[in-house]
Amino acid sequence: MALELHQQLKFNQQLFMTPQLQQAIKLLQLSRLELLETVQQELQENPFLEECPTEEETDNETLEEIRRGDVGEGAYDKELNRNADWEDYLGEFASTPRRSRSHEAELSDEFVPLEARYTVKPTLESHLLWQLRLSTMTEAQKNIGESIIGNLSSSGYLQATLNEIAEMSSSTVEEARRMLEHVQLFDPVGVAAQDAKECLLIQIKNFGYDRDSVLVDLIQSHLEDLEAKRYKPLLRKFRLDFEDLKEYLDIIQSLEPLPGASFDSSVPIYITPDVYVYKLDNEFIILLNNDDFPQLHLSSLCNTKIHCSSQREKEYCNERIRSASWLIKSLQQRQRTLYKVMENIVNHQKDFFEHGITNLVPLILKDIAGDIDMHESTISRITTNKYVATPHGIFELKFFFNSGLGLKNGSQISSESVKILIKNFISEENSSAPLSDENLAEMLKEALQVNIARRTVAKYRTVLDIPSSSRRKKYF
């Protein structure tokens, strides 16, 4: 059978994402900080994109077409040569523009972010080196001390052996050992220990408690028993009563097992809300946070005839103009979508904004997507890394989406509300007789008229990072 070649025409549909569409989707999921960085980078790279120093007039008719999405080829061409007035745009997408502007200065203090202080927090290493330099030691000893301090973990434990310290500092093991004992008495006492047990022993020796053999034995051999609250075997072994054991526990609990914990080097993360929601005259006002955000417009070069010496230069200019215009429109679309989503969240979670977290209702992405006629993936992107300042604190937009538990009357309650109730019940419990998961399930059933399994309560308690009843129990 002979093989033959044939030509055939076939029509098929294929989804193709243009670079502009990819950019618009990317802008949706960027956080405020990432968005600012993206815009600043575009301002540096695109000669046809500028930042408005002052408020400028714009063609209201064209802007209205852009807002409605009815942008044809003619309107698109006109928009290329006109500026996008962000203040006018945002005013149209505020719940009560005139009133909100007049009351914008009346935002509650809780909405004003606290600025970071411009001071350098001392690290554990710098604190120890400062003490080392103030000590009356030889240069060789200081060199050994620097090697010890340079090999500490963030918790303050030594991560190198004496042989390694001696090799790094070109000294003997005995010299390294003597210097290590000296560094371990620096503030905080117990630093440069090998583990928590050695750290606590150094501290009780420094405070003069090492003369009590029971205390030393408790730290050396029974820290695990104390942590698990296995007290009865200890009472029999050391022939103590509960009051005597409590005194030893108070001493041990006053010590610091992690000497470097107070010198945490992690950098705090400051959140700037993307949206503000506050109550005014029994009405919730939604304001998009546009502070420090550049107001973009097309450069005046777009209105002049640019002389291009080649077709390549002409294509470059046209591409840059289209890119600048598309970025402005994409940013406007992002703000429009963010406002619509936040407005619907407020409508669905009105009880939360009125009374707090315990009144949060179940909500899924599909509910919001159906209300504003958008895809669920769009709602997911616009709620990622976005934060809203409410009368009850700052929350990520995804916080308002949670599953629900069915009540006996046919209604539902959100899982977050159940977690808050569990947390409140445990905070009010008797520490000597803490509530078990079964007790919590019974209390939730009585309070909410909902049947919750013990394992569900245990799951929620674990999510809240609350230990079991046996670990919460206090004997003294």
Image (tube, rainbow, N blue to C red):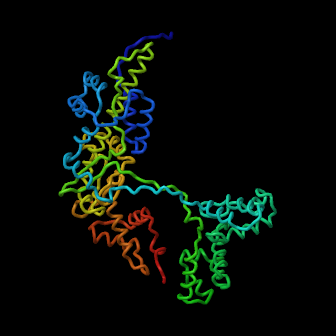
Q: In this view, does 94 lie to the left or right of 242?
A: left
User: What percent of the width, then of the height, locates residue 186?
Assistant: 65, 69
At x 40% / y 45%, what residue is drawn? 31
Tell me which corner region of the image, top left, top right, bottom left or bottom right, holds residue 147: bottom right
Residue situated furthest right in the rendering:
172
At x 35% / y 41%, what residue is drawn? 377
In this rendering, the answer to whether 220 lies above or below 356 is below
Q: Is residue 255 left or right of residue 429?
A: right
Circle count: 0
Q: In this view, does 434 lie to the left or right of 78?
A: right
Residue situated furthest left in the rendering:
281
Q: Which of 29 and 238 is in front in this view?
A: 29
Tell me which corner region of the image, top left, top right, bottom left or bottom right, holds residue 395: bottom left
Q: Nearer the viewer, residue 445 or 16?
A: 16
At x 71% / y 70%, what residue is drawn? 182
Tell me which corner region of the image, top left, top right, bottom left or bottom right, holds residue 306: top left
Q: Nearer the viewer, residue 438 or 468?
A: 468
User: What percent of the width, then of the height, locates residue 220?
Assistant: 66, 76
User: What percent of the width, then of the height, locates residue 465?
Assistant: 45, 65
User: What percent of the width, then of the height, locates residue 221?
Assistant: 65, 77
In this rendering, the answer to whether 363 lies above or below 308 is below
In this rendering, the answer to whether 427 lies above or below 29 is below
In this rendering, the answer to whether 296 lies above or below 232 is above
